[in-house]
Amino acid sequence: MAAAGTGPGAGTGAGPGTGTGTGGGGSRPRGRRAAGGWAPCLALALGWALGWALGAEPPHRCRPDAALLPPPLRRLAGAALLRAAVPRLRGGWSPCQLYRYRPGTATGTATGTGTGTARPDGTGPCTRGWHYALPAAGLRSNMVTQWDLVCASRWKVPLEQTTHLLGWTLGSVAAGLACDRFGRRPTFVVSLGLAVPLGLGVALAISFVMVLVARMLFGAALAGAFLSLYVARLEQCDPPHRLEVTMVAGFFWIAGELLLPGLAVLCRDWRVLQGAVTMILALLAACWWCPALLLESPRWLLATQQLERARKTLQALAESSGRGADDQGSLMAELETLAEGSPQPRYHAVCEIFSTRVIWKNSVILGFTAFIGSGIRHCFTRNLAPHLPRFSSYLALVGAEAVACLFLCLTAERFGRRAVLLLCTVLTGISSLLLLALTQYLLDLIVLTLSVVGITASHAVTMLSIFFASEVLPTVVRGAGLGLIVGASFVGKAAAPITAIPNSRGFFLHHLVFASFAILSVLSIMLLPESQGRGLPQSLQDGESQRRPPLFRRPPREDHLPLLAPRGIPHDYSRLVSSTKRALGPRHSPAAAPPQT
C-alpha cells in the first residue's frame, strides 16, 4: 500500500526514480514479513485466553455424605438422598452446604421431603467433595475440578489469575528493557523459546502451587514475546500505515481468542489444551528462527549506532524487495563509510526517561489511561453476568474488542490519536458514572447497553493508549517505556480478579475510584502531542521536541515503510543515517574516516 499521492514506483530521492521493477520478486518477501508481524498474535492470544477455560467454575453441589444422616435415611438413593442431604436453594442445590442432623434423631416413614419426621439441625460444609455439571468452557476437567477450587477454596482462582497477570506485568517490563539493550528480534525469539518449557510445566504440574508459579512465568514469557513483536512491527512501518498494520495484528489476536473455545471442545481436558497451545508456540518458535520472517529493527540499530548491523539489515530489505544494493548505492556507501570508524553502540537506560520533561509527561499520562481502560472494564463486565451465560459473556467481550479495533481503524487515522482517545475516555467515564449512580433505577436493557458501550470504549482506550505511547516514545527507550505502560494496563486488569474474591466488599469503591480516574484522565489527555502522520522520534532530543498542537488540526504526513513498501529501502532511513552521522560527530565523516589496514 502506498501513502496518499504516491504510487508503488514514486521517487522519493532515496531510490532510483520511478522504475517498475517491483514485480512479484518483492511481493513474496513483503508477504513473509507481514506474516511475521501478524501470525504470532494468533498463538499469543491462545496463551492469553487460556485462563478463561482453565479457571472456569462449573455449576456444582456437594456430594451427599451418608455418614451425616440418621441411620434410617442412609438407605435412601437418588433424588431422595439428595433431598435429605443437600439444602435446596432457589436456583438449585446448595453448592457448599450439607444438612446436619442431631445424633439420635428419630425418624418415621419417609414423606415427600424424603426425611420423614427428621428435621435437619443446621448445615455445614461439604465433606465428600463436589459433583460438577460438566463441561465447563468446553472442558471435561480444568484446574477448578482438579483441585476443588470452590467454596472455601474459591479464593485460589482469583489468586491464580492475579499472579498470572503479575507475570504479564513483570514480563512486559523485563522484555522492554531487553528490547532496548539486546534488540527486538532476540527478545522475541528468546521469549518464545522460554514459553515452550514453561507451558509444558503448567500442563505437567502436580499441585496447585506448581500451577501458580508455572502460570506466572508462562505469562511473563508470553508478555515478552508480545511486547518485542509489537515494537518490531511498529518500527518497520511508515506513518500512514502504522495504525493499519497494528490494528490488523489486533484482529489476528481477536481471531486467536475466538479459536480457543473450539480448541477447548476438541481437547476436553485442561492439560491437553495447555499442551496443544504450547505445541503451537513451539512450532512458532521453530519457524521464527528464520530472520526473513522478522528482521531486527533498522531504526533501532541506527538509533543505537550499530551501523554495520544496520547496513546488513537494510541491504537484506533491499534485496528481498527485488532491488540489490546497487540500487541503494549512496545510502549503503554512506553507512559503510560511517561503520569504518567502528563507533561503539550507545544504549539508553529507562531511568533516563525520568530526567526528561515531555517524554516523562507523555509516559505518565498514557500509562494512566491504559491502567484506567483495563481496570474499569470489570465494572461493566459484572453487569453482563446475570444476563448472559459464561460462554456468551466471553463472546460478547471478544466482540466488543473487535468493534473497538474496527472503530480505531476508521477514526484514529482520520481524526488523530488524541481526539479519538479523548472521545473514548469520555464515553468510558460517562457510562461508568451512569451505571454507578442509576443502575437500580434503569431498565435491564439500558444497563446492558451502557455496559456494552463502556466495555467497547474501555477496550479502545487501552489499545489506543498503548499504540499512542509507542509512537511518541523515542526509539532508544521505546521498548522500556512501552513495557512500563503495558505493565500498567495489566495492573489495571488485576483489579477484576481481586474484587472477585468471595465476600469482597470493595466493588463499589473500585467502581467509584476508576470512574473518577476516567474523568480526571480527560483533562490530562489534552496535554498530549499528536503523532498522526509524523515520523517516530529517534533520540531523547526528538522526544522532547514534541509539542501539543490544536486538537483537530491534521499534521503533515511523513516518510515511508519497509514492512509492506514496494521499494527496497524507504527514504526515511536516509534521514536517519544523516542524523546518525551528525550524532557521531565530524570524526566519522567520509573525509575524516581512517584508512583501513
Image (cartoon, grey):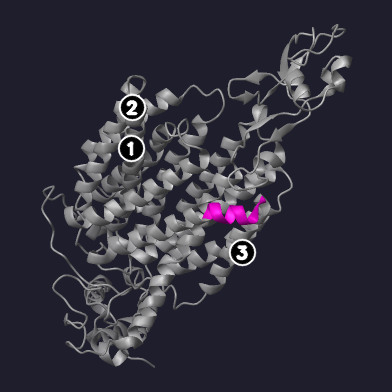
Q: Residues within 10 Å of mark 2 (few under 14, many from 20)?
A: many
Rendering coords of residue 433 (x, y %): 30, 27
Tag 3: amino acid: Met
Task: Answer left or right for 490 relative to 467.
Answer: right
State whether the magenta stretch is mostly helix, strand or loop: helix
Task: Answer left or right for 98 relative to 578.
Answer: right
Residue picked out by circle 3: 279
Look at the picture and state if 170 lies above or below 61.
Answer: below
Task: Specify the segment rendered in magenta.
Answer: 260-269
Rendering coords of residue 62 (x, y %): 72, 27
Residue picked out by circle 1: 454
Say what secondary structure mark 1 lies in.
helix
Task: Answer left or right for 368 relative to 90.
Answer: left
Residue nearer the viewer, 430 or 117? 117
Where, by quadrant of the figure, is residue 514 drawn? top left
> Mark 3 or mark 1: which comes first in sequence?
3
Task: Answer left or right for 357 relative to 508.
Answer: left
Q: Residue at x 41, y 52 (%)?
A: 483
One can see residue 161 in this view: yes
Look at the picture and state if 173 lies above or below 381.
Answer: below
Question: Looking at the image, do the residues carrying marks 2 and 1 touch, with CB atoms under 8 Å apart?
Answer: yes
Query: How much space separates mark 3 and mark 2, taking CA atoms?
Result: 43 Å
Rendering coords of residue 436 (x, y %): 34, 24
In the image, which is nearer the foreground, mark 3 or mark 2? 2
Q: Is residue 263 magenta?
A: yes
Q: Residue at x 18, y 56 (%)?
A: 414
Residue picked out by circle 2: 435
Q: Which mark is residue 542?
A: none
Tag 2: amino acid: Leu
